[in-house]
Image (cartoon, rainbow, N blue to C red):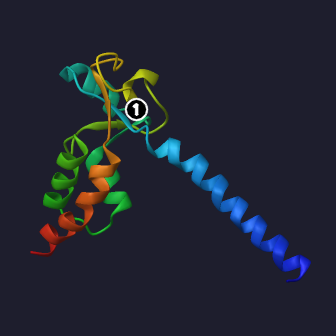
Amino acid sequence: MSKLLRRALLTGAGAVAALGLAAGPASAHFCFKTELNARAAQGMSGSSNWVSFGTLAAEFLPGLCDAGIAHLATAAGATPSTLINTHGTMAGGTLKKGADSGTPSISHLDFEALDAAVPEAFAICAD
């Protein structure tokens, strides 16, 4: 194998690994508040840091109908109108399990359940 081909393959593998390491933790921290009053929700909705689950789902899964988005939201542990923090984590302790699970009014999307629900969401929209 030529030196150039070997270098290209190693560079490509390194780039894929770096992307995976960078994107994995970032996508796992889409946090949201579970105990909002109306005034707080109104203030958050005017911020560029907060985007509704429905808007995110429509952006990342074009062609998904409202019923499909609602199905995904339920699977992820949210609602279509739940405001998601898209710029970072709100509390490091929210990902811990058990009695010491961090702030109870902050949660994060369940990406494993969300991924599993995508085919059914599109099936709902196909009907």
Image coordinates of residue 46 in percent, x first then y, are: 35, 32
Residue 6 vertical position relative to residue 89 in the rendered view, above or below? below
Q: Nearer the viewer, residue 43 or 6?
A: 6
The quarter of the picture where the N terminus appears is: bottom right
Q: Residue furthest right?
A: 3
> Dividing the picture into quarters, in which one does residue 57 lie?
bottom left
Image coordinates of residue 55 in percent, x first then y, are: 31, 51
Badge 1: how crowded within 10 Å, few (<14), some, or many (20+)?
few
- In percent of the image, x 24 and y 26: which residue is there? 34
**Total number of numbered discs in the rendering:** 1
Q: Is residue 49 left or right of residue 99?
A: right
Image coordinates of residue 70 in percent, x first then y, are: 16, 52
At label 1, the amino acid type is Ser
Residue 94 vertical position relative to residue 31 in the rendered view, above or below? above
The residue that disc 1 covers is 47
> Is residue 91 something one can see in this rendering?
no
Q: Residue furthest left?
A: 127
Q: Is residue 27 left or right of residue 3?
A: left
Element under disc 1: loop
The quarter of the picture where the C terminus appears is: bottom left
> Is residue 105 something one can see in this rendering?
yes
Q: Is residue 44 left or right of residue 48?
A: left
Residue 15 vertical position relative to residue 63 in the rendered view, above or below? above
Q: Residue furthest bottom?
A: 1
Q: Nearer the viewer, residue 28 or 55?
A: 28
- In percent of the image, x 26 and y 27: which residue is there? 42
Residue 19 vertical position relative to residue 8 in the rendered view, above or below? above
- In percent of the image, x 16 and y 54: which residue is there? 71
Q: Is residue 50 left or right of residue 73?
A: right
- In percent of the image, x 27 and y 20: which residue is there? 105
